[in-house]
């Protein structure tokens, strides 16, 4: 080919319009993968072929696989351009099939022949394939996934089923009735697969007249899902607040427990919250409980230590306490001498008020004295 012929060929190709099937965009290369689906066989041929048709339509190259774009005969320049376009379309097809299918078609020369062979081989839909797909549609359920994910998966299977069955399209009233029936079946399949949490809204949808479409039902269920999620988060924060309040001490009046009542203070142990009449160190600890050492007992020990130090310095710590008189001691010994068998109910009735009138060290001494005498008796 001379330089003039080459120049005229480039000029002719450059004049091709973008709508011409022989026009190639600079991005149209043989390494391009125009779809993300790989043809595996019968199970996904319909999906793959539809995706390829859409991609080739965008590239304006569908004519190379359906046989409508024929190779020019009287123009060598356009014929050469046709061969180039055919090779690129063929590589696009081979780039979108599995490795096993690639090996079987790599020696082909025409994109149309490869396309027809793949269709004749894998576009085989029998009853078992239809049954398997329809069974998967009916067995599909939400199972804890989001409503959107569940609906889109179901919608994909519906479209795959419709493409597989390929029902004829009519514009008559019977066609409209069949479409309404198909929408009813899809609505029931969608509602049956929902989780039980949507039972109230599902019942509401089924009692409507007329029944909503699948898309309308999906929109309503999606709003209900958002509402449930919002209430769930709110309840979670409320539970956290309730738990925080439950951990706080409780007071019948103000809702806050301020600890032991500071109005009562034991004159024996120095602890606040009780009086000497209820001091466990004097009346005894309940069965199964043990004395605990806390800040109050430490304070009481410090108070006792300070009291003993004050006593050594000449200041009596029991100046405000009631002390035993000689008359009371005589009465106590007299009551004990009257009954050699031990203390009686009447004697105890006299001794107890006497003990309750005592405080501090006097009460301890008297109690120890009584225990000693009773044990001897």
Image (spheres, helix red, strand yellow):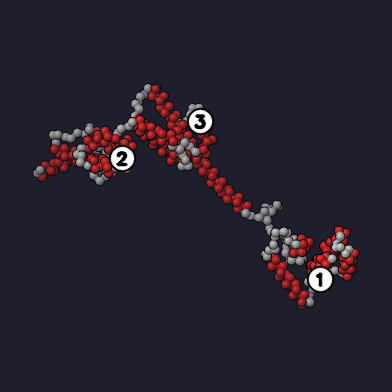
| Camera sees residue 16 | no
Between discs 2 and 1, the one toward the N terminus: 2
Q: Position of residue 298 (x, y in %)?
A: 69, 67
Classify mark 2: residues with Cα within 10 Å, few (<14), some (14-19) or many (20+): some
Q: In 3D space, how far apart are the residues under numbered discs 2 and 3 (Cα atoms)?
A: 41 Å
Q: In 3D space, how far apart are the residues under numbered discs 2 and 1 (Cα atoms)?
A: 105 Å
| Camera sees residue 361 | yes
The disc placed on residue 40 is 2
Answer left or right for 340 relative to 59.
Answer: right
Name which residue lies at 19% across and 39% down: 109
Question: Disc 3 on helix, strand or loop?
Answer: helix
Q: In 3D space, how far apart are the residues under numbered discs 1 and 3 (Cα atoms)?
A: 89 Å
Classify mark 1: residues with Cα within 10 Å, few (<14), some (14-19) or many (20+): few
State the image quarter where residue 323 is shown. bottom right
Q: Position of residue 149 (x, y in %)?
A: 43, 41
Q: What residue would you read off at disc 3?
A: 206
Q: Position of residue 336 (x, y in %)?
A: 87, 65
The disc placed on residue 319 is 1
Q: Residue furthest top?
A: 173
Answer left or right for 190 relative to 1.
Answer: right
Classify mark 3: residues with Cα within 10 Å, few (<14), some (14-19) or many (20+): some
Q: Could you tell me which quadrant the C terminus lies in?
A: bottom right
Front residue (pair 164, 299): 164
Name which residue lies at 27% across and 34% down: 121
Judge whether 98 appears above or below 328 on screen. above
């Amino acid at each position: 080919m001379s330089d003039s012929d080459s120049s005229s060929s480039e000029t002719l190709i450059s004049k091709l319009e973008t709508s011409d099937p022989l026009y190639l965009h600079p991005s149209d290369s043989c390494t391009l993968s125009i779809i993300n689906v790989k043809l595996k066989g019968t199970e996904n041929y319909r999906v793959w072929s539809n995706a390829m048709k859409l991609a080739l339509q965008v590239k304006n190259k569908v004519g190379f696989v359906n046989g409508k774009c024929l190779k020019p005969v009287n123009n060598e320049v356009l014929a050469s351009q046709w061969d180039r376009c055919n090779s690129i379309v063929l590589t696009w097809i081979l780039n979108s099939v599995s490795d096993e299918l690639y090996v079987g078609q790599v020696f082909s020369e025409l994109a149309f022949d490869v396309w027809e062979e793949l269709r004749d081989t894998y576009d085989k839909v029998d009853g078992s394939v239809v049954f398997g797909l329809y069974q998967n549609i009916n067995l599909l359920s939400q199972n804890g996934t989001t409503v959107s994910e569940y609906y889109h998966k179901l919608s994909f299977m519906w479209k795959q089923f419709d493409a597989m069955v390929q029902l004829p399209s009519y514009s008559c009233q019977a066609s409209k009735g069949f479409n309404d029936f198909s929408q009813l079946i899809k609505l029931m399949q969608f509602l049956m697969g929902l989780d039980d949490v949507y039972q109230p809204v599902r019942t509401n949808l089924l009692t409507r007249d007329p029944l909503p479409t699948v898309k309308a039902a999906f929109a309503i269920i999606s709003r209900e899902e958002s509402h449930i999620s919002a209430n769930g988060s709110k309840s979670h924060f409320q539970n956290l607040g309730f738990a925080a309040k439950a951990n706080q001490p409780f007071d019948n009046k103000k809702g806050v427990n301020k600890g032991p009542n500071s109005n009562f203070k034991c004159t024996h142990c120095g602890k606040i919250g009780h009086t000497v009449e209820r001091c466990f160190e004097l009346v005894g600890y309940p069965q199964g409980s043990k004395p605990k050492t806390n800040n109050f007992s430490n304070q009481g020990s410090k108070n006792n230590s300070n009291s003993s130090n004050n006593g050594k310095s000449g200041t009596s710590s029991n100046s405000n306490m009631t002390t035993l008189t000689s008359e009371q001691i005589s009465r106590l010994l007299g009551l004990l001498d009257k009954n050699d068998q031990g203390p009686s109910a009447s004697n105890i009735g006299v001794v107890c008020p006497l003990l309750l009138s005592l405080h501090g060290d006097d009460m301890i001494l008297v109690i120890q004295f009584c225990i000693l005498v009773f044990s001897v008796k």
